[in-house]
Amino acid sequence: MQVKFSEDVVPLSDLKVNPGKIVTRANDNKRPILVTSRGRGVAVVQGLEEYEILEEKVAFMQAVTQGLVEVQEGKTTELTEAKRILGLK
């Protein structure tokens, strides 16, 4: 999801005039659109599907990081115990 600054930056005034066009563009090109005011970024318009995918990736990476921290701290469970807890054989 690489931003193309030549295409994916719009002034706030454009968003005010035609928000549907900006939202449709974000959904169609699968990239976030940076909204600017007075030359500075103020918001991002992103399609819902891409937002949900990104949130899932962030949650997964946080869980992996937490697991690695727990392993370093010695907070581990034997495989047989983990299987018992999960109801697996």
Image (spheres, rainbow, N blue to C red):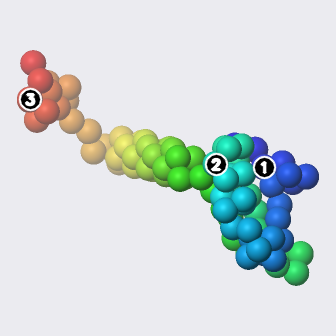
60 and 56: which is toward the camera: 56
Q: Secondary structure at mark 2?
A: helix
Mark 1 = which residue? 3
67 and 71: which is toward the camera: 67
In the image, what residue type sits under mark 2? Asn
Decide which of tag 2 and tag 1 comes sooner along the chain. 1
Instruction: Using a 10 Å C-alpha cutoff, classify the residue at mark 1 as few (fewer than 14 neighbours), some (14 to 19) or many (20 or more).
Output: few
Q: What's the distance in space between the residues labelled 2 and 3, CA to CA?
A: 41 Å
| Left or right: 62 in relation to 12 | left
Q: Residue at x 81, y 55 (%)?
A: 8
Mark 3 = which residue? 87
Front: mark 2 or 3? 2
Mark 2 = which residue? 27
Q: Quadrant of residue 67?
A: top left
Q: Position of residue 13 (x, y in %)?
A: 81, 77
| Left or right: 83 in relation to 66 | left
Q: Residue at x 57, y 47 (%)?
A: 50
| Left or right: 82 in relation to 64 | left
Residue 72 in view (yes/no): no
Q: Residue at x 8, y 29 (%)?
A: 87
